[in-house]
Amino acid sequence: QVQLVESGGGLVQPGGSLRLSCAASRRLWYASSMAWYRQAQGKERELVAWIGNDGLTNYADSVKGRFTIFRDMAQNTVALQMNSLKPEDTAVYYCKGIFNGNEYWGQGTQVTVSS
């Protein structure tokens, strides 16, 4: 069993920045991939950013150029740096990890972009 715990959400004005962090209970070396998803109220959960074990990344078109996913192996965390935030980025953000073919999710952290 792997626990994932997100942190860093909050309220930010449009154009602002936030950094989300996902702490894993198992070393990230064992993850085949890590990802951030989000779910806005009344909408389906969607993939935001993905990072493979080899460091390759992929992003949703809506966040390309604004969001960056990266791993801190020393801290054993996966972060999502979010810049130039827009009201439409408002959602609950979830961390997901694949370890030994099993899928694990965090509990989510709320991000609200509003003036």
Image (spheres, grey):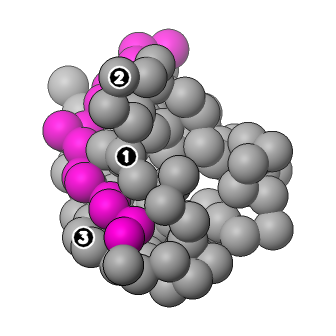
Q: Is residue 27 visible?
A: no
Q: Residues within 10 Å of mark 3 (few under 14, many from 20)?
A: some
Q: Where in the figure is residue 84, as x and y percent of width and height?
A: 63, 78
Q: Tell me how far mark 1 sits from mark 3, CA to CA.
A: 10 Å
Residue drawn 18% across the image and 38% down it: 107
10 inside magenta stretch = no
Residue drawn 73% across the image and 42% down it: 60
Drawn side of residue 76 relative to residue 98, left or right: left
Q: Is residue 64 visible?
A: yes
The residue range painted magenta reads 101-114
Amino acid type, mark 3? Gly
Q: Disc 3 designates what residue?
A: 10
Q: Where in the figure is residue 9, as x and y percent of width and height?
A: 27, 66
Q: Quadrant of the N terminus?
A: top left
- Of the numbered discs 1 and 3, the one sitting upstream in the chain is 3
In terms of depth relative to the viewer, which is nearer, 19 or 54? 19
Q: Tell me how far mark 2 sits from mark 3, CA to CA.
A: 20 Å
Q: Where in the figure is residue 39, as x and y percent of width and height?
A: 40, 33
Residue most toward the front? 115
**Labels 2 and 1 touching (C-beta < 8 A):** no
Residue drawn 55% across the image and 71% down it: 85
Amino acid type, mark 1? Ala
SS class, disc 1: strand
Q: Disc 2 designates what residue?
A: 42
In terms of depth relative to the viewer, which is nearer, 91 or 35? 91
